[in-house]
Image (spheres, rainbow, N blue to C red):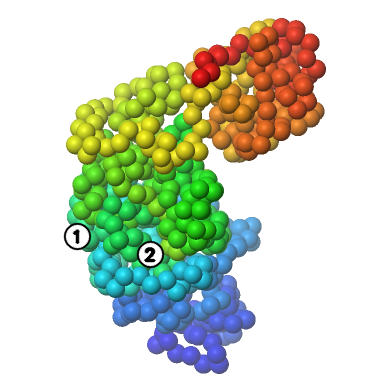
Amino acid sequence: DVDKKHDGLIVVPHKDGDVLVKGDRQGIIMDKNNNAEKIDHKEVNRQNDAVNDNDNALKFKPTQRANFDPNAPGEDGKAVSIDKDKLSPEERKKFDDGWQNNAFNQYASDMISMHRSLPDVRDAECKTEKYKDNLPDTSVVICFHNEAWTVLLRTVHSVLDRSPPHLIREIILVDDFSDMDHLKQPLEDYVAKLKKVKVVHAKERIGLIRARILGYSVAVGDVVTFLDSHCECTEGWLEPLLDRIATNKSNVVCPVIDVIEDDSFKYQYGNARSTSIGGFDWNLQFNWHAIPEYERQRRNNKDHLPVRTPTMAGGLFSISRQYFTEIGTYDPGMDIWGGENLELSFRVWMCGGVLEIIPCSHVGHIFRKRSPYKWRSGVNVVKKNSVRLAEVWMDDYKKYYYERFNFDLGDYGDVADRKKLRENLKCNSFDWFVKNVYPDLFIPGEAIASGEIRNKAKPMCVDSSVDSNNFHKPVNMWPCHNQGGNQFWMLSKSGEIRRDDGCLDFSGGENVIIYPCHGQKGNQEWQYREDNTVVHLNTNKCMETSADGQKLLMKPCTGVDKQIWKWKRKNSS
Ligand code: LR7
Ligand code: MN
């Protein structure tokens, strides 16, 4: 009997004796002879989940379930900390393999209940907000390639546990040709017990974009909601999304994406005021921004109201199933990962829809630092996907992306069908999108100079990546390679030397560093003068290359060849 309680302790059976899972004793197993050992949380969770899933699926909130223990690992979204050096060699191997296979701490996830409780992260205004009585229902489509068992099923249970049952038509798990054993028969057996959940298997690796199209093609709900396979939905996440679609079927809506830490599984969140919206840079990478002032004013400074966003991160959103069909689902010529989020964002806006983030709807996502699965060898998949979307949607603006790799587009396949779609839908131009939806976007065409910054004394160019993990590091010189990339720099109207969101920044000493562009001039204000020197206005110093040509230094201006730079000037308009 799993649910017997005595002395304020919850007791569940364990192969070595009863397990105490509450209060001070949490984490300790007392066997029949009163010997203590470290608790096997995985086993406890398995037992608890068996009780809950068989009888009570869709019936109880996580905190109401049999054997709920507020002090168990990860409950209330708390961090799990593991001292890996104290693990036995066998456990240590599991720990290391978990990281290796998933790029997150699978070992920690396995200690946490698949029904763990989370804080109610919503602003007060959200909890009293009234939504329509007759909301449309939704199919939830979750695609995965080799996802960890507890992480995948926690995503599923978080949907079932925290959504009004009548609003969930079904959950469709799309298996993108995984080869991990647990995703085969064991997954089939597990979901067979859960009403409403089905698994669709791809016959070959189709990538996340075609996997989503596959999931959508079998969906029957009024709305389709996409989630990544490592998410956790919080209380009240669904109603505000569906409400916006009920208001207008061409509203495409995203929850706020909270961070589930990759190592501790801590659930991190902020308030509605700190909600970020989506943008992109000219490498066609998605990025986050603060809500602009004009958008705050449009919403009368009510932070919990839906906020318009130029782009979506991609993984988590709801869309009317009929509207998704009308605007052309996804580009099936896109492979594996990437680009589809900007493609859908541009398409929705340009073809008459509205893209929003809903601050009252929060879903957690495990953000990882690397991709754990195999990609295609010999193809730059992200570039190929991005060129496809640039060709179809970006009109003249596509050149700003292409000049980053000197117009070497590579083989991007056939986009005739997608161009046809744009024509049929009679969509607005990309220029309309930029001016009306994303007026804050930095436009390279407005740059005063752009391209490589080549030194006269040596055939060397200013070279640095602008990855955020490169911020604060000194910028160096490298032989000019004429490929753009890390040698491509733009001088903005306000004097920034920038690429994407990284700016050259000088604050004294001799080194120039990369720092996020702040638009405040100061340490980021430069001038490219008629005598071809590059001058830092605040300090009146000049860029100079070191005698060996390897370093970029800031020195008093003298006009020697080491301070002369060739940089392509653009016509100022
Ligand atoms: O070949 C694949 N087949 C798949 O089914 C590759 C991936 N996948 C699955 C994978 O298991 C996962 O569930 O697709 C999903 C996304 O892949 P991730 O989690 O490895 O990548 P990501 O979280 O970086 O993905 C973000 O960008 C992608 C661009 O193509 C997609 O739009 C993802 O949905 C998107 N995720 C989010 O928006 C969550 C927030 C991240 C941010 C910002
Ligand atoms: Mn993801």
Q: Residues within 10 Å of mark 1 (few under 14, many from 20)?
A: some
What residue type is disc 1 on? Val
Are the residues flagged by discs 1 and 2 in contact, CB closer than 8 Å? no
**Residue at x 22%, y 39% (from the top left corner):** 425
What residue type is disc 2 on? Pro
Pointer 2 residue Cβ closer than 8 Å to ligand 1: no
Q: Which residue is mark 1?
A: 220
Horizontal arrangement in the rendering, residue 434 relative to residue 477 (left or right): left
User: Of tags 1 and 2, which is closer to the observer?
Assistant: 2
**Residue at x 41%, y 47% (from the top left corner):** 312
Looking at the image, which is closer to me, 377 or 138? 138
**Residue at x 40%, y 65% (from the top left corner):** 237
Question: How far from the left and from the top, in percent, is residue 451?
Answer: 53, 18
First-in-chain label (1 vs 2): 1
Q: Which residue is mark 2?
A: 240
Is residue 112 positioned above or below 408 on the image? below
Looking at the image, which is closer to me, 183 or 246? 246
Is residue 273 positioned above or below 402 on the image? below
Is residue 354 positioned above or below 380 on the image? below
Callout 2 secondary element: helix
